[in-house]
Amino acid sequence: MKRFHVHVSVDDLQAGIRFYSTLFAAQPARVESDYAKWMLEDPRINFAISQRDGKNGVDHLGLQVDEAAELRDLHGQLLAADAALVEQTAAACCYATSDKYWITDPAGVAWETFHTLGAIPVYGHDTAVTKAKGCCGR
């Protein structure tokens, strides 16, 4: 099953946590010194905020899948939607390891499709792909 993903960059993490916890009527599922994530069921969304650079606002959008087979299924759709698909395997980003594909829509918005493999204790590190495609760490 798919879960919509939104990642927003904020300048004040604590203010963001207060605001979105009130808006969603739920506490984050994960909080770190520079990151918070809500895994909501209604609406089914993975909503994350981070305090990683000076540019505030929507960082990227995406679809999170529960199974690796779902990610493989999405691969064909992504290829049809954008020839500039970028693949990452076991990418360390946003306190998780994930297999993912990136595309950019016609408006220049980065879209991430991913299957989370597991949690890690660090935010992750920048790579040429994440800088070019707007991943969590830029």
Image (cartoon, helix red, strand yellow):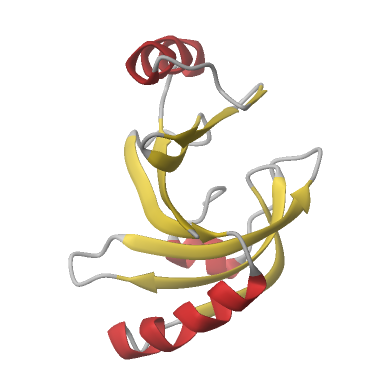
Residue 4 horizontal/vertical position (percent): 40, 51
User: At x 77% / y 52%, what residue is drawn?
Assistant: 118
Whole-percent x, y for residue 54 in the image:
41, 33
> In screen coordinates, is 69 left or right of 41?
right
Q: Is residue 113 above or below residue 74?
A: above
What residue lies at 18% left-to-right and 65% top-to-bottom?
A: 107
User: In the image, what residue occupies the spot 39% across and 73% down?
Assistant: 103
Position of residue 114 in the picture relative to residue 95 (left or right): left
Q: Nearer the viewer, residue 121 or 56?
A: 121
Q: Nearer the viewer, residue 4 or 44?
A: 44
Along the viewing direction, whichever of 54 and 21 lies nearer the viewer: 21
User: In the rendered view, would you say 94 is above or below 111?
Assistant: above
Question: So how many labels did they put on this image?
Answer: 0
Spot occupied by residue 19 in the image (x, y as percentages of width and height): 37, 13
Residue 99, given in percent of the width and then of the height, sits at 65, 68
Is residue 6 placed above or below 87 in the rendered structure? above
Question: Hey, which residue is sitting farthest right in the picture?
Answer: 121
